[in-house]
Amino acid sequence: MLMSPLLLAAALLTWPFAPARQRLRALPSLPGARTRSAARRLWRPSPSTPLVVAAGALAGLLLAGIGGAVAGTVSTATAWTRWRTRRNERSRLLATAGFARALRLMVADLRTGAHPATAAEGAAADAEPLPARILTTLAATARLGGEVTHALRAAATGSPALSDAIDRVTSAWALAERCGVPLADLLDAACADLEHRVRFAQQVHASMAGPRATAAVLAALPLLGLLLGEAIGAGPWHILSETAPGQILLAIGACLACAGLIWTAHLTGKAGMS
């Protein structure tokens, strides 16, 4: 009885949507190894937010009725949003750290007398994919005599994870062109600032791990109480799933637990920005 709604929710999460079907139709035209790698990527689930929330609501509805659907919707939306936020934060920190390392290589080439385009190309050759793409754009624009600041602003728009870092490089480049300040010194200062920001963010995340874990444990305590009640034969699940007051209490309890998690995330986020 409990496995059926869980299996239905899992089927909803892995349901192929339009882009997946388009990739499936494109597979026969791909040669050999590319086809196999594309097939492996195709079958990797990539659920979107509406699918995840709908799966949580469906599982809650099948397990505990209307109150369970409300609880499943709120709980799934909160957990999914927090997971995506943390993943985006980690991606931004990793991208910023990689961009700072690439700038260090560029600064080293500039101090040896290399042209900015040549230094950017050399740094891009050893950089990670996203910083390499940005530095390649910078190098191509500088070599052709174009507006590097405009190209960097366009790159910042297309790379949200590195928008702040690219803005600093854009300001440094504009200041070097306008005032004649050595570009190596300006980029070195921008790189030091980025490295400091990454270290500070990592320290804050490490210091906030305790409060976040405490909030997660407190939010999970009602589930533990439910399991203990079932173990001693009190039947709390029957009350929550099959009585009107239990349905109301289930929905209210899930909303309050998720509100506590959201408020804790807000407080820890404010601590990280201070």
Image: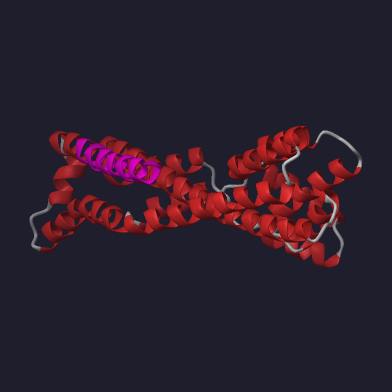
Q: Nearer the viewer, residue 96 or 195?
A: 195
Name the image colouring.
secondary structure
**Extreme residue in the right direction:** 144
Q: Is residue 121 left or right of residue 13?
A: right
Task: Determine which quarter of the picture holds residue 231.
Answer: bottom left
How many marks the image carries: the answer is 0
Q: Residue at x 13, y 50 (%)?
A: 236
Name the chief secondary structure element in magenta. Answer: helix
User: Could you tell me residue 248's position as x and y percent?
Assistant: 18, 34
Can residue 174 be seen from the camera position used here?
yes
Task: Determine which quarter of the picture holds residue 58.
Answer: top left
User: Could you tell me residue 159's position as x and y percent?
Assistant: 66, 42
* The N terminus: image quadrant: bottom left
Q: Residue at x 38, y 53 (%)?
A: 204
Determine whether 264 is above or below 91 in the image: above
User: Could you tell me residue 270's position as x and y percent?
Assistant: 34, 40
Can residue 158 be seen from the camera position used here?
no
Q: Residue at x 49, y 40 (%)?
A: 49
264 in the magenta segment: yes
197 in the magenta segment: no
* The C terminus: image quadrant: top left
Q: Is residue 273 left or right of residue 164?
A: left
Q: Residue at x 87, y 35 (%)?
A: 146
Q: Nearer the viewer, residue 223 or 216?
A: 216
User: Could you tell me residue 43's position as x and y percent?
Assistant: 64, 58
Query: What range of the chain is rendered magenta?
Result: 252-274
Q: Is residue 146 left or right of residue 132?
A: right
**Extreme residue in the bottom direction:** 33
